[in-house]
Amino acid sequence: MDLDFPVSFSVSDDEDAGAAATPPGRAICHTGCGRPSRVCLCPHLPPSPLHTSTTVVVLHHPHALRRNPLSTLPLLARCLANLHLLPGRRLRLSSTPLLPPPSPNPVLLLFPSPAATDLASWCRSTPPSARANTTLLLIDGTWNQAREMHAASLPFLSSFAVPVSLPVDSGVDGDSMFESELVVRKEPHKGCMSTMEAVARALRLLEPEGNGAGVEETMVSVLRAMVAFQAEHLQNRTVKPRVKMRKKKDIKWEEEMKRNAGLV
């Protein structure tokens, strides 16, 4: 059974998004952000988690925290009070009592899919009273993992969740951290973003009475600081070029072409 993951978890050493894997003996900010002290983000975090009328639920792949040093989930948990993290590969009725909600409040599945409506358009066409206390659902993992988790969860979600998305241009390559101050890793398409940035952009639209702008700016400033640490680390790091792996069929084809050309 997928259980509601507590947001007060402790970030392990290998979740250092501002440097490589944490070597033994490195000073860690255990009482705050959980990151190595030299890339501590505590000065950028809100004094206490922000309270929102929107309930944010994130289904994250079981490996998202243990094997992904650039996961934004630990920082997201320290920014939002009304956040629920669910480890698992799919959502079902037994996953959490939050879904489907006991009241008729809307559940928005934020995921780029052909069936998704632009979130800004949904907000404009939905009266504030009808979107009060919205539940925002996201899927976190690599893009391949997220697609699989989305497909596995649809049989359950399709009966009550409204698919929405933020603008993504699949015809244009995405930015890297050296081209954008908010990109954690190279994105596949223009407009793709980390889970933390997606939540920040969505809350700007969903939160009532203009509160969303302040929530967004606070979260974006934390993400901006994290990316700056990571970009600085990579710029100062000497990386050996990766040996390109070649398929046997390609090697065989090249040898055959050389033989036909009389080169071997």
Image (tube, helix red, strand yellow):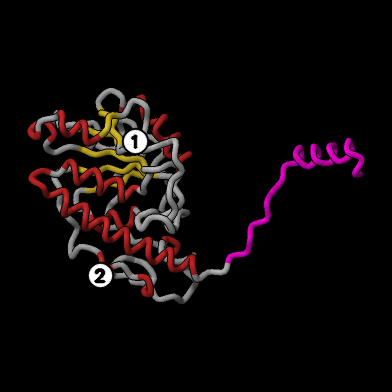
Q: Amino acid at mark 2?
A: Pro
> Which quadrant would the N terminus be assigned to in this image?
top left
Q: Position of residue 201 (x, y in %)?
A: 25, 46
Please name the residue shown 49% across and 67% down the image: 235
Q: Which residues are magenta?
A: 239-264
Identify which residue, 118 or 28, lies in the foreground. Answer: 118
Identify which residue, 162 or 193, lies in the foreground. Answer: 193
Which callout, 2 or 1, points at the residue further toward the start of the chain? 2
Q: Residue furthest front?
A: 261
Inter-mark Cα distance, 2 to 1: 31 Å
**Secondary structure beneath disc 2?**
helix
**Secondary structure beneath disc 1?**
loop
- The quadrant in which residue 69 appears is bottom left
Seen in the picture, residue 52 relative to 160 is either above or below; the reply is: below
In the displayed structure, does residue 63 sit left or right of residue 78?
right
Provide the residue designation for mark 1.
Answer: 111
How many residues crowd around disc 2 within 10 Å: few (fewer than 14), some, or many (20 or more)? few
Provide the residue designation for mark 2.
Answer: 43
Please name the residue shown 36% across and 58% down the image: 181
Seen in the picture, residue 66 relative to 248 is either above or below; the reply is: below
Q: Position of residue 178 (x, y in %)?
A: 44, 59
- The quadrant in which residue 36 appears is bottom left
- Tell me the number on the disc at residue 45: none
Number of callouts in the render? Answer: 2
